[in-house]
Amino acid sequence: MILSDKRILEEIDKGTIIIEPFKRESLGTNSYDVHLGKYLATYKNRVLDAKQHNEIEHFEIPKDGYVLHPGTLYLGVTLEYTETHGHVPFLEGKSSTGRLGIDIHATAGKGDVGFCNTWTLEISVAQPVKIYAGMPIGQLIYFVVEGNIETMYNTKGNAKYNNKTTRPVESMMWKNKF
């Protein structure tokens, strides 16, 4: 079951959903629009290794925008910091974003109950497109959880993305044992 606009507002009042900054006009019928933060990052190396720490270079999106190009994975970040303490958050692209050929996540659209941070976006484009900090980039949808949660994401000792940040975070796959 997906939360409606009224239910999202009720959960915000209860403190089980936190969105900062919260703008009422970003609340849709059953989702909340999130915006692109001012930082992007790209990997330093063209070939990535899943067993190694692949370093990234951060840069700020200029006021007059930045052109994304196909063939490069860009890491972006949401302007909004979110906390979700009783629901499963899903981040999806907006149809307007998709119609520009922008994909905001390669595979990681689902968050965990207890996720407390900004969202790193795995951005790729079908053709060159100019983007801007603050533009609507995606929408959060909240699903009801069936059953009790044993371990919230923000209390897991092995959670790799718990450090609060306003910048995109690179893959932490290298921390896994395989």
Image: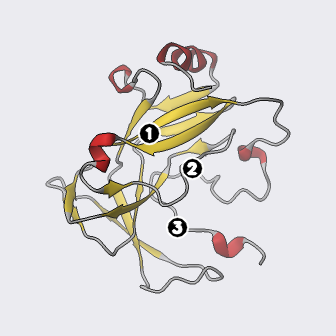
> Residue 150 shows which numbered tag?
none
Residue occupied by mark 3: 170
Task: Name the residue at 39% across, 67% down.
Answer: 41
**Mark whose residue sits in front, 3 or 2:** 3
1 or 3: tag closer to the N-terminus: 1
Q: Are marks 3 and 2 in contact (CB under 8 Å)?
A: no
Front residue of 156/173: it is 173
Q: Is residue 92 visible?
A: yes
Q: Is residue 92 above or below residue 48?
A: above
Q: Are marks 1 and 3 in contact (CB under 8 Å)?
A: no
Task: Please identify the quarter of the rendering in which residue 33 is found.
Answer: top left
106 vs 35: above or below: below
Q: CA distance from mark 1 to mark 2?
A: 12 Å
Q: Quadrant of residue 60?
A: bottom left
State the image coordinates of residue 87 (x, y, percent, origin top left): 66, 31
Give the foreground label among 1 and 2: 1
Q: Earlier in the sequence, mark 1 or mark 2?
A: 1
Give the residue number, with chain letter if any, for mark 2.
Answer: 164
Mark 2 element type: loop
Q: Which residue is mark 1?
A: 80
Residue at horizontal 44 percent and vertical 57 percent from the top:
167
Q: Residue at x 65, y 52 (%)?
A: 162
User: At x 57% / y 68%, what residue is drawn?
Assistant: 171
The image's colour scheme reads: secondary structure
Q: What crowding class fits label 1: few (fewer than 14 Cα within 10 Å), some (14-19), or many (20 or more)?
A: many
Secondary structure at badge 1 equals: loop
Q: Quadrant of the N terminus?
A: top right
Element assignment for label 3? loop
User: What amino acid is labelled 1 in the image?
Assistant: Glu
Instruction: Indicate the amino acid at tag 2.
Output: Lys
Instruction: Estimate how packed mark 2 is, as few (under 14), some (14 to 19) or many (20 or more) residues with alpha carbons within 10 Å.
Output: few
